[in-house]
Amino acid sequence: MQAVDTEEVQESESGPPGAGSKGEALSPIRARAARALHKGLFTVVLMCLVTALVHVAMVFLHVAPANAVSKRYSPQVNAWVYPLFEQNWRLFAPDPDSANRQILARTSHTAPDGSVRVSDWFDLAAVDSSAVEHNVFPSHTTQNLLRRAWTTYVELHGGDDEAKSERAVMLQQYLCNIAADRFADHNRGPFEYIQLRVLTLPIAALGSAASKRPPAPVENRLLPWWKVTPHGN
C-alpha cells in the first residue's frame, strides 16, 4: 500500500498524463506567432519612418531656394506636394484678398430623349460665406478650399482657360471636382457637365482720394463646360 501511495503522489505532482507534451507542442506555435507579430510591427514602424522622412525631404526641397537637387527632381517634388501639402510664407507676409469674388456654377444633363437640361446658377461662394459668418472657429476648408483653388487656377491659366502644364491640368481638374461636389451636395438631379462663372469686384481703397475715383468694373469670367463624373444618376 505504501508503494501505491508514493506513485499516486508522484503522478499528482507531475500533473495528468500528456500535460507536459501538450505544453511543449504549443510552445513553438506561440513563439512563431510572437516572431510574426514582432516582424509586422517592425515593418509598419519602418514604413511610417520612411514615409515621414520622404515627406520632410520633399517639403524641404519645395520651400528651399532653387538648387541643383530641387531642379533635377522638380516633377517628383511637385507631384508629392501639390495640391495637399502646398507651402508658402503668407503666414508671415499676409496677402489678403483685394477683391470680392462670387463663384457660381451650373450643370448640364442630357435626358434619355436627347434633350439637354441646364440648371440655374448656384452660388458656391455664398455657401462658404454663410458657413463662416458668425462662426467663431470656421474650418480651414470652408474658408480657403474654393478660394485658393480659384486663385491658383488663375495664376496657372492667366486670362484664358488653356492648361499649358501638367500642374495646370491638375488644378483645373481639382477646381472642377470641388465645384461638382459642392453643387451635388446642395442640389438634386443628375448632371454630366459643369460650368463656372466668376464675378470679381475689386475692393476700393480707403481714403478721400480713393473715394473720388470711379468704381472699378466688375470682371465677369465665364469658363468652358467641363465634363465630370456623372452625379445623381
Image (tube, rainbow, N blue to C red):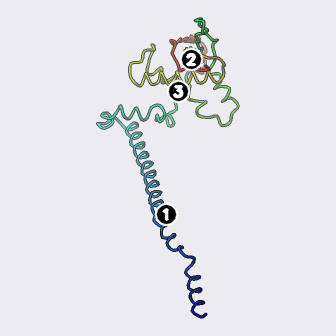
Question: Comparing marks 1 and 2, which lies closer to the viewer?
Answer: 1
Residue under label 1: 30
Q: Amino acid at mark 2?
A: Pro
Q: Quadrant of residue 145?
A: top right
For the point 43% across and 22% down, the residue is 168
Q: Secondary structure at mark 2?
A: strand
- List x then y, in percent, for residue 26: 50, 66
- In the image: residue 198, left or right of residue 86: right
Residue that lies at the very extreme toward the front in this rendered image: 1
Residue type (three-letter) at the residue carrying disc 1: Arg
Whole-Å distance between the Cαs marked 1 and 2? 71 Å
Q: Which part of the image, by quadrant, shows the C terminus?
A: top right
Q: Amino acid at mark 3?
A: Arg
Q: List the residue tagged with mark 3.
A: 148
Identify which residue, 51 or 10, lies in the foreground. Answer: 10
Q: CA distance from mark 2 to mark 3?
A: 17 Å
Task: Find disc 2 in the rendering and name its residue.
Answer: 202
